[in-house]
Each structure stands twice: as C-alpha cells, then as structure tokens.
Amino acid sequence: MKIFDTTELDFKDVLIKPKRSYINSRSEVDITREYKFKWCPRKISGTGVIVANMATVGTFEIAKHMMQHKMFTCLHKHYPLEDLIKFITENDCRDYVFLSMGLRDEDYKKIETILTQYPDKCRNICIDVPNAYIPKVKELVIKMREKFPDILLMVGNAVTAELTEDLILSGADIIKCGIGGGSACITRRITGVGRPQLSTIFECADTAHGIGGMICSDGGVVYTGDICKAFGAGADFVMMGGFYAGCDEAEGETIEKIILTDEIDPDTKERKSEIKKYKVFYGMSSEYAQNKHYNGMPNYRASEGRLLKVPSKGPIDKLNQEILGGLRSFMTYVGARRLKDVSKCTTFYRVNTQLNTVFEN
C-alpha cells in the first residue's frame, strides 16, 4: 500500500491569473494551431476541441458542424461499416474526424477495411478503452502502427506519466487522459479508481511533450472556462461528451417537463408554469449502453455509467461560438496570441471557491 501525499487538483480547485497583455481585442488571437505529430506524417491546422465518441454526440450530424470550425469529432464505434463508408466518401473527413475502435475483433476488421479500401478518406483512429492499463491496449497500438504507419493514432484512457510514455513510444500520437471525470461516468463511485483532471493533465502533458507526443484531456468539463484551464495546463486537445449532449443536433430522446416558476399569474393567482426540454444522454459503460449496443450486461462486470437527462442547450453552432469566444477571451487575459502558447502564459491560483452561485437553481 502506498499513499501520495500531494493534493491533486481538479478544474474547480483553480482559477487563472490575469496578466499584462499587449492584445487589444479578442479578434487578434489565433485559436487554431498547426499540429505536428510524433508518428503521423500529416500536419493538421485546427482548434483542439473534440466531441467524445459517445453514442448521442459522436455522430455524423455533430461532425458536420464541428468541421466547419476546424473542431474535431470522435465518431462512436457502433456505426455499421456501410454507414461509415457512406459518410467518409461524401464528406471531407480527413483532418477533423476520428474513427473509433475498441479491442473487439469486429472493431478491428471494420477499421482495417476502411484504412485499406479507402486510404485517402479518413486515417484518424481512436483506440477507446476505459482502462488502457491492460496489456491488449499496448499490443493493439503496436499492431496498428506497424500495419498502418501513416495513421494519426489516439489511445486512451490513462492518468499517469508511465503509461502515457509507454503508449507513445509504442506508436500512439495522442494519449487520451482521464478516468472517472465524465458527467455520465461512475467509475470512481463503483471502483474507487480515478484522478482529478487538472493534475492528470499536468503530469501526462509534461511527459508526452518531452518525447514528442500529445495528450487529449477527456472528461470533467462543466463550464467553458474548464476548457481554457485544460489548455492552460498543457492539454493539446480537450474532449467533451456531456457538454454537447444537450444541443439540438445531439441524438437521444427529447423529453419535455412542465416546471412551476416563482411568477404568479395575476388572473388565476397560481404559479405560472413553463416547458423545459431535456435530452437523454448515457455513459458508454452503463447498463443502458450495454443493453442497447451489446445485447446485455455481462455477468462479470458492473455498470460504470449512468443514464441522464441533460437540459437543452439550443443549436450546436451557438454552443461552439460560446466555446471559441471563451477561448479568445481567455487568451487575451493571459497574453497569448496563439493557442499553442497558452500553457506557457498560464498561471493558476488555488482557490476554495470559484463561482458566485447565489441565483443558480
């Protein structure tokens, strides 16, 4: 048994220190960067926000909107081969779309078919396994890099320097970092395993950058400011699932609820009501997901995800404008003209509280 005495930090534990800046307007900053990878020979210019490969948000419809802003989407791994082929042949997916795969043989065969038969359409691959510490993950990384040396390969999930280094040296370009921080994830509750996201980024980014690799922060984003904190801490990409789950373009059942307000109707003298809309969103390790995509929960595992009703957020383009606008404003506060430079310009305060919530429900 071993205990690490250092206090680990999450997004809610810090705020960003403003600094003297020579930037006069948000319009002066560049929220894209040119990504150069350790193994993949391609360069990609983009803003490093990624939609997670969860079934209701890692979709074709979401991807079409994200590409317009040079933002990324990890498609969920449950699309049939013929649907993926149709999408990648009808859309320009080469830079901003990742195809997802797990450890199942059918996943590998599907990805192998696309990479072999459609070599110029989509060569960004995400190996998505909740626990990247098992040997099969490294074995698959080595196999994919040897067979398809030119692919852009993202692998997850990890939270420590040791595994980050091992997977990058084995052939991964980007390590997806984070365990248990997602809004629909209950891994920490069920297993006791996890690590606060900000400390995860600090350690994994430092290690990855030292050997020419990159990291993607996965999970824990509640506010757009958390995206800024992730980039400021050293993340090259920031992945979100629940944050996008309430947008109009997300899949999932729409639920309407009648909510009583505090306003009184002058005629009836009763409280007025309003209709609020919600979208169904679920974790990919939940019992709901297992029943929907894998014909039931195996008797050797427990559910590590949950089914949620997420408040409607309106159109995804409006949400993306909020994200990109927040990034621009953050960069002017710390004096960073380029997205690539923000981690060099960011200093954090440790805080006991960060928001005034007196009027929040």
Image (cartoon, rainbow, N blue to C red):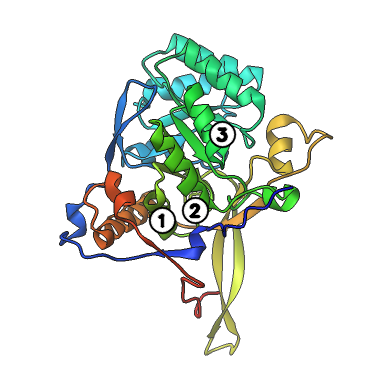
Labelled disc at residue 229: 1
Looking at the image, which residue is at 63% across and 37% down?
130
Left or right of residue 346, residue 201 in this image: right
Looking at the image, which residue is at 65% across and 17% down?
105
Labels 3, 1: front one: 3
Within-10-Å neighbours for mark 1: few <14, some 14–19, many 20+: many
Q: Where does label 3 land, which residue?
A: 163
Query: For numbered disc 2, what is the local secondary structure?
Result: helix
First in residue order: circle 2 vs circle 1? 2
Left or right of residue 323, residue 107 in this image: right
The x, y position of residue 75, in whole percent, is 50, 32
Verify CB contact (< 8 Å) between mark 2 and mark 1.
yes
Query: For numbered disc 1, what is the local secondary structure?
Result: helix
The amino acid type of the residue labelled 2 equals: Leu
Q: CA distance from mark 3 to mark 1?
A: 23 Å
- Front residue of this view, candidates 49 and 178: 178
Residue 236 in sight here: yes
The x, y position of residue 322, in whole percent, is 35, 57
Labelled disc at residue 198: 2
